[in-house]
Image (spheres, helix red, strand yellow):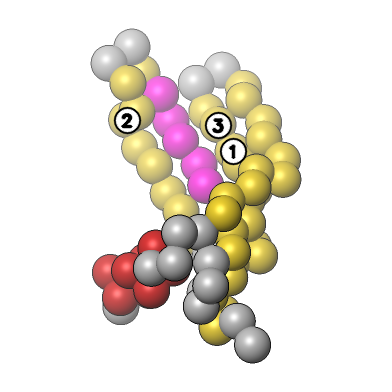
Amino acid sequence: MVRHSTGEMLRGQPTYRMRNGTFRRRCLFIEWKAVSESAQMNDGIGTFVFTDEGIRAQTVRYTLEARK
């Protein structure tokens, strides 16, 4: 399901926009949205935890909606 929805969004060259971002200590929290020809995501959330070696953990949540 995730691969299908991500593939659906990536078809049509989506435009992403970060709405808000907060970085504290080693954690980044971002709110974003994206729009493509066939779909949109208006409630994207991403979190990242960094170590000296790079990204240690990452989460993503969004609702994929068909465009009308």
Percent position of residue 5, x then y: 38, 74
**How far apart are labels 3 and 1 at the CA level?**
4 Å
Q: What is the span of residues highlighted in magenta in the rendered image?
A: 46-50
To which residue does mark 3 refer? 28
Identify the residue at image location x=59%, y=38%.
29
Instruction: Report helix, strand or loop for mark 2.
Output: strand
Answer whether residue 47 is magenta in the image: yes
The residue that label 1 is drawn on is 29
Q: Amino acid at mark 2?
A: Arg
Position of the C terminus by quadrant:
bottom right
**Residue 3 drawn in magenta:** no
Q: Amino acid at mark 1?
A: Phe
Could you tell me what secondary structure mostly forms the magenta stretch? strand
Q: Amino acid at mark 3?
A: Leu
The total of numbered circles placed on residues is: 3
Residue 7 in percent (x, y) is at 33, 69
Asked which quadrant contains residue 51, the reply is top left
**Looking at the image, is mark 3 or mark 2 earlier in the sequence?**
3
User: Pointers 3 and 1 in contact (CB under 8 A)?
Assistant: yes
Q: What residue is rendered at 63% in x and 57% in y? A: 33
The quarter of the displayed image where residue 40 is located: bottom right
Q: Is residue 8 above or below residue 24?
A: below
* Point 62% across, 22% down: residue: 24
Measure the C-alpha gap from mark 1 to mark 2.
14 Å
Answer with left or right where residue 60 lies relative to residue 32: left
Per the image, the residue denoted by label 2 is 56
**Upstream in sequence: badge 1 or badge 2:** 1
